[in-house]
Amino acid sequence: MIYYLLGTYIENSNDIIKIRKPAVSAAGTLRSRYILKSINKKIIVISVTVPRAKGFFEKKKIIINERIKVIHLKALNIIGLRMFFSFIFLLEFLIKNIKNRDKIIVYNCDPHIIFALFILKKIKNIDYVLQIEEMYSSYNWKYLKGYVYNLAEKIGIKFANSFTVCNNNMIKYLPKGKKYIVSRGYKTWESPNYKQFTKNIQKMPIILFSGRLDYVGGVEVFIDSLPYIEKECEVIITGNGQLSKKVKNYKNYNKYIKYNYLGFIESEKYKEILIQAKICINPTRGKETFLKNSFPSKIFQYLNYGNIVISSKFSEITNLDSIKKYIYTYDNDSPLEMAKLINNLIDKNYNKSTIAIEFENYFSNQEISLKRFFTKIL
């Protein structure tokens, strides 16, 4: 049997999320769905779904379709030990249900997952594929947290049988001789209707930022660039995070800008904005080690909807072949440099359909490669 083991899996909206209130990443959700789509075999998703809500939560099974079944493990959150109990319940499930020669795909190196998997591998003859979307050691966390996450990452990498990584720089961390594939991002618009682009042209160009509202995500760089924009436009920011309050309370004094913070929005509304947008922003801080060992998946989502992208500079762009010409970069996390790009590009005429089609062709080749990889190792 094939299993997909990860922190939290969401398929549309479900009561588990409302009741348990786990930490959820929109990018992680879309990436995990893409991985499942790339595996043309029956698979059981093991969702640990660590609760932030207090109390005990029963295990719940959800049938997605004839190929995919999701199991949200039981969980307990009392006296601050939610991770410990999730580790115990996961280990219990793995020992009872995983058989010799089963295959497991593991999303990232979360300690409560990796430590349980490490014990299982000592007991049973199983192979696992480690899907690395970010290197936790890049965060430079201090004290006990840093030690635990770094240890989990080292163990996860050392004992994995094969890997998917999202960035060429990450290859150097993998054991020699192990099989791997570089697979980046996802697409959310499966069958684009390119006529929608012409129907949704806005009189005032839309500049969109979407994603994590924290220091690493770089939303402050974008906000600090706004006073320097000299062309009429509508700025839309979506997402949540530590800096949500600052973004919400931003006072816009630039007469050229209409400023809107929408917070977390439903996928259909977000899709509508992506279709209408002209420029999309990826200000993930280039000075942070994090960007060297990850890939900002939203860049692919932006291109999927035919948008040009303004991004902090990162080395992986050079490996994006035919689509890198639609990504314009600035140096040193500079708000002024970002504003210069916005001012230069906002009046630029480009064909959204052309961008979307070129991205479709590029991504199709990546999809084929990933499916072949999974066919060989699973």
Image (tube, rainbow, N blue to C red):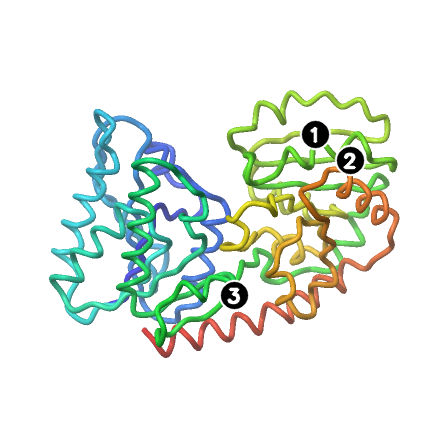
| Local secondary structure at mark 3 | helix
Quadrant including the N terminus: bottom left
Which quadrant of the view contains residue 60? top left
- The reply to whether dot 2 and dot 1 touch (C-beta < 8 Å) is yes
Dot 2 or dot 1, earlier in sequence: 2
Foreground mark, 1 or 3, reads: 3
State the image coordinates of residue 105 (x, y, percent, origin top left): 32, 62
Q: Mark 2 is on which residue type? A: Glu
* Residue 245, above or below 129: above
- The reply to whether dot 1 and dot 3 touch (C-beta < 8 Å) is no
| Local secondary structure at mark 2 | strand
Q: Which residue is drawn at 45% across and 48% down?
A: 138
Disc 3 crowd, CA 10 A, few/some/many (<14, 14-19, 20+) = some
**CA separation, marks 1 and 3?**
36 Å
Q: Residue at x 23, y 27 (%)?
A: 55
**CA separation, marks 2 and 1?**
8 Å
* Residue 53, above or below 110: above
Q: Mark 2 points at which residue?
A: 234
Query: What numbered label is drawn on residue 135?
Result: none
* Residue 262, above or below 90: above
**CA separation, marks 2 and 3?**
36 Å
Disc 1 crowd, CA 10 A, few/some/many (<14, 14-19, 20+) = some
State the image coordinates of residue 378 (x, y, percent, origin top left): 32, 73
Q: Name the residue under label 1.
A: 260
* Residue 40, above or below 233: below
Q: Name the residue under label 3.
A: 168
Q: Residue at x 28, y 53 (%)?
A: 46
